[in-house]
Amino acid sequence: MCGIIGYIGKEKCLPKIIHGLECLEYRGYDSAGVAYINNKNIIINKEKGKIINLKNNLNLENESYIGIGHTRWATHGEANKINAHPHQVGKFTIVHNGIIENYSELKKMLEKNKYSFKSETDTEIACALIDYLYNKEKDILKAIEKALKTLEGSYALGIICSDDLEHIYAVKKTSPLIIASSKFGNFIASDVPAILEFTNKYYLLNDAEICILSTDKLEFYNQDLKNIKKQIKTFEGTYESAAKGGYEHFMLKEINEQDKVFKDTINYYFDGTIKSLEKNFIGFSKFKKIDIIACGSAYHTGLIGKSLIEKYANIPVNVEIASEYRYKKSFYDKKTLVILVSQSGETADTLAALKKAKEDGIKTLAIVNVIGSTIAREADEVIYIKAGCEIAVATTKAYLAQVAIFSLLAIYLGYHNKLIDNDDLKEIFKELNKMPSLIKKTISKANNYYDIAEKIYKNNQIFFIGRGIDYALCMEASLKLKEISYINSVAYQAGELKHGTISLIEKNRVVIAIATDEELINKTISNIKEVKARGAHVILVTNTNFAEKFYDDLIIVQKTHPILQPILTIIPMQLLAYKVAKNKGCDIDKPRNLAKSVTVE
Ligand code: F6R
């Protein structure tokens, strides 16, 4: 997600702005830029990719004492230099975090008023709007206040104007923005980590308040342009604790972001109509077979994808581990679509599988989080999930967003193949709308899952069992638990136990059974009873109420449409794994021997 930093003061601005941007890297970005005042001119520098690219093209020792900087996480328009911030229109130069929802109607209005645009961004429209209003009002503050009343959506803006080279203006609605003060100058920033090197004193800007920053003064105004006093705050924590936004671990923070991640990912491809899915996914409807290739958790999302696409769209799907796939014979043909799933977009085995498919002339689609990553660049088509920067090694929010994409693909392909009709669509869309609040509600029940974690964290072996799509969920639940808690956990197809593994079941052996699939639930219950009869301690994870108690502990997940159910069911499993690892005192965000991006074979 975008990051904003700005500085005005007695010291050179560029080293501070670059440092601030580096501290905001954890938010995720794909380009970076600065605007600074030098010799009464506003100079803009921006680059695609990492901050180092920008830094290499800047003289940090420039005699400049006022500047704004930005890291961009692409929303409107691809990640390139033109779309990178800052944007300049007329007398105004701005950086922006958030989304301007009414930008297309504003664009039409501004074009009629002789404005033209270089980028594909909503930010350039916001900048032009302020310039347009300034030309009418002849007053910067009034122009910003009028813009606030016109701009819809969420935004935080850092603004400089060529008619006033002694101030930075800051304003926000919904998106976060803080104003910080130090002995040697004042700052704007998206988040506390960006300013902690220089000061821990800051003000929280409320929606529609405007701040005018000078070298040694801060003036705050409310939406009626009345001067207001604000309470200064002191941040007592460290950089790391600030970046974690108050959560003890990045993993917990990322689990808690999942309602927003779901919303951002879905809204990017779906506007409430099947037409939007048609527009975004039409190219994938001609394939008769799909191969999904990935590693680890991304492979597990592929298993969910297989279940959904086969069931709802009647297309055969083959899911394979990339490190196996790259060396084996493949039976694809021109009617096969190869889907590579990767959070980082850099996983060596997944990249090798992509190259193999491309060399064989097979169409490839990447489902990726990191914008501009190698897999995203090399695949024929890319669907970005909108998970933002994921820092904890064990993936949570990227997994959920990948599953959300597979749900959307299954909905679209099912409709296209006439297995989902308009009534089904209505029902699914209704549930889809409810999902962010259901995700939030599921996360808010963490204490229920934590109580169960207390009971099981001392075990050295835990089994997960399920059938069909619930088995795919067990695979991910088991990986999550073992990778961060170091408990040996294994996932089995519930019906397969009696062919060998059931010999491991003994008194108090913990078995976590996931049973949400209506068509298979009774079969799974029979398997649960088999392990229960042999002394297992059964934790049932289900969306159904049962009169009979054939389990020891129960985790109830809200029932939703089966095409969306996995998104809710995985959340208690993530939180359970988190709490077990926490109780065991494990290094949750950086489990031993693991790396976030596996770029070796
Ligand atoms: C587990 C986990 C890994 C990754 C795997 C693939 O929590 O994060 O299993 O899913 O290493 O990584 P990406 O998705 O970056 O290709």
Image (tube, rainbow, N blue to C red):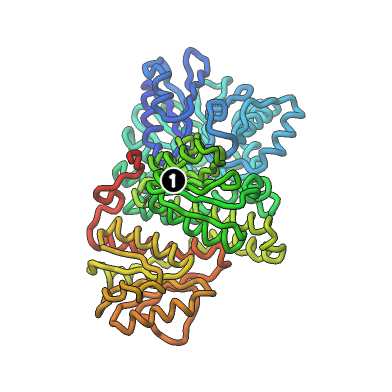
Q: Residue furthest bottom?
A: 548
Left or right of residue 302, residue 104 in this image: right
Tell me the kind of residue under disc 1: Gln
Please provide percent x and percent y for residue 8. 43, 26
| Mark 1 CB near ligand 1 (8 Å cut) | yes
Q: In the rendered view, does 181 fall on the left or right side of 137?
A: left
Q: Is residue 220 visible?
A: no
Residue 519 lies, in percent from the top left, at: 54, 74
Q: Position of residue 437 (x, y in %)?
A: 53, 62
Closer to the camera in the image, 153 or 226 = 153
Please tell me which residue is depicted at 58% across the width and 20% down the height of the picture. 163
Q: Residue at x 56, y 68 (%)?
A: 560
Q: Is residue 348 above or below residue 6?
A: below
Label 1 neighbour load within 10 Å: few <14, some 14-19, many 20+? many
Residue 199 against residue 43 in the figure, above or below: below
For residue 481, what is the image quadrant? bottom left
Residue 305 appears in the picture as rendered: yes
Is 55 on the left or on the right of 174, as rendered? left
- In terms of depth relative to the viewer, which is nearer, 333 or 295? 333
Residue at 68%, 30% (x, y): give it: 133
What residue did someone put label 1 on? Answer: 343
Residue 249 drawn above or below residue 97: below
Residue 491: quarter of image:
bottom left
Residue 275, how many percent across, how many down?
70, 50
Foreground residue, 334 or 146? 334
Q: Quadrant of the C terminus?
A: top left
Residue that lies at the very extreme toward the top in this rendered image: 39
Furthest residue to the right? 112
Q: Nearer the viewer, residue 161 or 554?
A: 554
Q: Is label 1 in a helix, a strand or a loop?
A: loop
